[in-house]
Image (tube, rainbow, N blue to C red):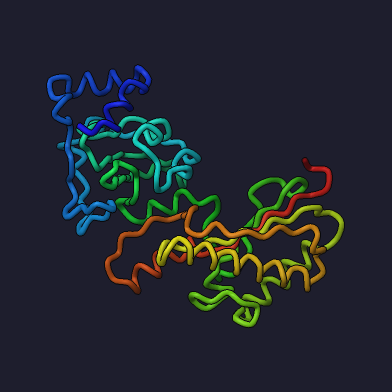
Amino acid sequence: MKKQESNKLSRRPSAVLSWVAAGCAALLLAGCGTSVVSKGLNAEGVASEVVFPDIANRATLPEGTFVNRDNLRAVGAGLSKDQLYDLLGTPHFQEGMFGVREWDYVFNFRSGGGVTTCQYKVLFDKDYLARNFHWKPDSCAALLADTPVPAPAVAVAAPTVPAAATRNFRLTADALFPFDRSGVSDLKPEGRRALDRLAAELKGAQYERVEVVGHTDRLGSAEYNLRLSQQRANTVRAVLVEGGVAASRIDARGRGAAEPVVQCSQSARAALIDCLAPNRRVDVSAQASGSR
């Protein structure tokens, strides 16, 4: 058992200690539970083949749980097992805290008047920090989106909170820019028209603050993605200013790949790029005067 993980045990709440003791008291020092189900898991937490355990034969809670979607949205790379437990609760299969690099859950979502059941997998790196996340089926990732991705992709999403206070808009980067581009001169014609429409809606005194946040997918280095997301946010800001929104009211920043809305595991690069498209986006939030 690693010293780092041993020290964590003394800090865990009684609920975690009860879980560990109930499931594997006799095997505690040996690192109870299933260490790895997927194949070829490397030190960075990437599996050559992602394998989901069978719910009927292996799940300790086969009926699953109705997970808090906001908690799921807060999950990201770099979280410790303690933090994941606080957000998602006990894994639903025979998996423990020690020496384990894979946690699996069964989550239920109310959607379309019914219930959708999904499997969710977290893969850890060699230091037992969460690195990669997978859904079965892949379509379950879309259940975390605040609003469905509209068609055409450049369409502006409906506000997620009352318009009198704040309006949120989501623009897909692929509709605004060619892949891996970010400048004003790179804007696609339909992307430029969408930004012009957005500027017409936002200009005027009714909005005292506009935040523009650029996002990328996980392909490429963290430094490159942060720079690309900032450049795209700056471009959107420039077009809004040109369209009549006061520059002093707009903040633009990039978040790189830190806030994905979907997780993808395709091995073919073209298929992976397509799957990751929702993560390549620019979010615009407009706050009305007197709403704070």
Quadrant of residue 235 in the image?
Answer: bottom right
- Quadrant that contains the N terminus: top left
Residue lying at the far right of the rendered structure: 205
Along the line of sight, the residue nearer the viewer: 162 or 99: 99
Which residue is at a point 65% across and 78% down the rendered structure image?
184
Q: Is residue 41 visible?
A: yes
Q: Is residue 212 left or right of residue 69?
A: right
The image quarter in which residue 212 lies = bottom right
The one nearer the camera, 77 or 158, is 77
Residue 13 x %, y % = 37, 20
How many numbered marks have been drawn onto this rendered protein structure?
Answer: 0
From the top left corner, tell me how far across and down residue 90 is, in percent. Answer: 32, 30
Which residue occupies 80% across, 54% down? 207
- Position of residue 63 relative to residue 25, above or below, is below
Residue pushed farthest front? 3
51 shown above or below 266: above
Is residue 66 shown to the viewer in this render? no
Does residue 146 appear left or right of residue 251 in this picture? Answer: left
Task: Locate residue 250, reporting x and y percent.
Answer: 74, 59
Q: Position of residue 216 (x, y in %)?
A: 49, 63
Look at 41% across and 67% down and name the residue there. 220
Q: Residue at x 73, y 56 (%)?
A: 210
21 or 231: nearer the eye? 231
Question: Left or right of 186: which side holds 142?
Answer: left
Q: Quadrant of the C terminus?
A: top right
